[in-house]
Amino acid sequence: GDALARLLAKAGYDVTREYYINDAGAQVQALAWAAYWRYLEAAARAGLPGATLDAIRASPDESRATVGAEFGTVLQYGGDYLVPVGEALLAAHSGALMPPSDAILAQVRRFTVAAMMVSIREDLAALGVTDQVFISEAELIDAGMLNRAEERLRALGLVYQGVLEAPKGKMPDDWEPREQTLFRSTQFGDDTDRALRKSDGTGTYFANDIANHLHKIERGFDELVHVWGADHGGYVRRMKAAVAALTDNRVSLDVVLTQIVHVLKDGQPVRMSKRAGSYITLADLIDEVGRDAVRFTMLTRRADAQMEFDLDRVIEQSRDNPVFYVQYAHARIRSVLRAAGDPELADLATTPLDSLTDPAEMALMRRMATWPRVVEAAAQAREPHRVAFFLNDLSGDFHLLWNRGREDSTLRFIRADEPVATRARLALVAATGAVLRSGLAVMGVAPVEELRDERKLED
């Protein structure tokens, strides 16, 4: 998402980055119960009386079922990452949170969401994702956005009371065999109308998402781009229908779907399971290979393609590692320019290039000339991986020219006996470095100045 925002900004769009916090609904309530369970564990270790699951089992809240019947039960959201949340709840409130009540669970929910957001913000900062606007689902609902969205659709004659036919296959969360408040999404290309409110009057997940989109529309955005997990693919058509209805097709909605990343080490998959608490976090990856390697590697595939993140390959210094290959090209460029006294690109801009006639030199120039078109096409397609492909190809052209100079002394970048050709080649090298830096900036990756291992790459 951050790379896509950078790409769109590079292409001339005025971009606002937003992070949507899903902090409302049954799943967050289940998360709160799981955190409360961890609080009871911490309280039991501290010897506080009443720290058992009996109070949870007596609660009327249906989401208590996610906690399980006994302390050893694996929770739906009870991974190890909630252990410090439980300890923090105990430190802040001692035994005042026992027994649970609706008010206490609301307090635990807010505390847990805040703790999760601290962790998320830290991970985003470590990854170099900044300047974001954080939008809370719960705050939008409290501000009346859900009601306003429903009223807007109702005024357009697009809301009615009815009973949807039972869907085939997997049963969606918002289907009920009872009368619900429905949105006529079939009028906008969806395959069925969609529930806005359940039979008990509470909003559906879809309705809350409509409120989020209306919030963006009312702030004047005319193009919306979302990055969602592939498991939300079924929501795309209905959200497009809602946005089309709310704006009379004036606002576009694009959704980029992303697949799960499989992490490998020593050729074997690293098992991940957030529900069991044994999983690889983004922070783990950054600690292992560094921020830039994580960002670059993640952007070497289409977002909707399966990816295997090989921890060994990412740090390998070889042609097969695009992270190293591109950074090595920039390091070589910097070594050439340092040897020439670091001439400014602006001073080389008017240099005649007539002497650059070798096929490798011509290929490098032709490749650089396509950069503006690559940016435009990648932005239109919402595909930042095209930038990674371009940088890999550009680096390959440069490495080829570097190796040609090793084999043929007349093609070396710096020759004391050929000042005109030297200046032209320095202009070519400096321009290549500028384009590489431009592409790396789109990817949010810092260019390296030097690499210690000056091995020869065979192309």
Image: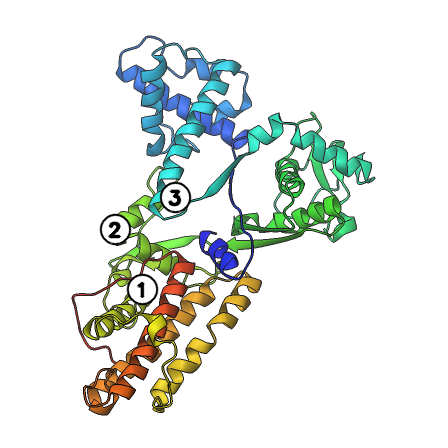
The residue labelled by disc 3 is 124
Residue at the image point whose x is 47% and y is 56% from the top: 6
Which amino acid does the dot numbered 1 rest on?
Val
Q: Secondary structure at mark 3?
A: helix
Please name which of the two marks, 1 or 2, marks the residue nearer to the observer. 1
Q: Secondary structure at mark 2?
A: helix
Which amino acid does the dot numbered 2 rest on?
Glu
Sort mark 2 into few (<14), some (14-19) or many (20+) by Cα contacts within 10 Å. some
Q: Are marks 2 and 3 in contact (CB under 8 Å)?
A: no
Residue 334, numbered label: none
Q: Quadrant of residue 157?
A: top right
Which amino acid does the dot numbered 3 rest on?
Leu
Residue at the image point whose x is 36% and y is 90% from the top: 359
Q: CA distance from mark 2 to mark 3?
A: 16 Å
The residue labelled by disc 2 is 288
Left or right: 221 as drawn, with respect to 344? right
Instruction: Residue 245: give x, y in percent of width and height.
Output: 75, 46
The residue labelled by disc 1 is 323
Quick one: 407 or 256, which is closer to the camera? 407
Please name which of the two marks, 2 or 3, marks the residue nearer to the observer. 3
Q: Quadrant of residue 283?
A: top left
Residue 459 visible (yes or no)? no
Q: Quadrant of residue 353?
A: bottom left
